[in-house]
Amino acid sequence: MSIVTRRFLSTAAPKNAVSALTVFKGSCYHKIDFKIRDDKPANEAVKRFAAFNIGCLAVTDASDQVVGVVSERDYINQVSAMGKDDKKVSIRDICTPNVIIAKKDDTIEQCMNKMLFKDIRHLLVMDDATNECVGMISIKDLIKEVMKDKDEIITRLADFKMGKGAYFGSE
């Protein structure tokens, strides 16, 4: 089987695949306002990064449309390293436009492939029907979800070895 064929097959969503939207619902981004206006000063983003222990925010314009993302890396490279005043530099001046997104039905594998391809750590989750940003996920969120599945398998195998959960529901 060729690499192209394997890649194509790996992007097909299995029946029980966990979606990007499901990952978002378990993410730290689900509990906070992860959007920031592009006209805000850069120090507002840093305050949010520190307050919520996050590394990225979705950037919106005056009409609340997503126009990019701003990350800790953006701040370090374009404000801190350049010795600029973060109260005078606006988010629009340092944000990354034309971001890679995840569709809400994308699988974990599809999301990871997108992140690896572009060497990024966050994806906006978009709703195809409304073209609205419905969430944000990080590589950490994806790893947690993958590990959750692995932990369940390890527990089942350990229980099987110890005789738990065998025939007739014995435990």
Image: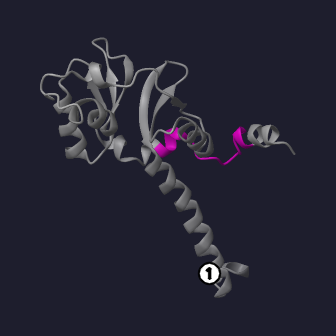
Residue that sits furthest to the front in the current view? 82
In this view, 47 is above or below 133? below
The N terminus lies in quadrant: top right
Front residue (pair 163, 89) = 89
Residue 25 is inside the magenta segment: no
Left or right side of 36 for 108: right
Instruction: Find residue 151 and report its horizontal and vertical position in percent.
Output: 55, 68
Compared with 103, 138 (above or below) is below
Q: Secondary structure at mark 1?
A: helix
**Residue 134 at what x, y percent from top left?**
43, 30
Pinpoint residue 11: horizontal percent, then vertical percent.
Answer: 70, 39
Dot 1, how many residues are within 10 Å of its Cα: few (below 14), some (14-19), or many (20+)?
some
Q: Which residues are magenta?
A: 10-23
Q: Is 34 or 82 nearer to us in this picture?
A: 82
Q: How is the image coloured?
A: one colour
Task: Residue lying at the far bottom in this picture: please name it.
Answer: 162
Q: Quadrant of the C terminus?
A: bottom right
Name the quadrant containing residue 37. top left
141 vs 78, left or right, is right
Residue at 64% from the left image edge and 47% from the top image edge: 17
Q: Pointer 1: what residue? A: 159
Q: Nearer the viewer, residue 101 or 30?
A: 101
Query: Residue visible at 71% across and 45% down?
Result: 14
Query: For the residue marked with disc 1, what is the amino acid?
Result: Asp
Q: Residue at x 65, y 76 (%)?
A: 157
In the foreground, 133 or 11: 11
Does residue 160 appear left or right of residue 51 in this picture?
Answer: right
Vertical relation: 9 (above or below) 84 = below
Q: Quadrant of residue 104?
A: top right
Residue 6 placed where, x, y %? Answer: 79, 43
| Residue occupying the far top of the picture | 63
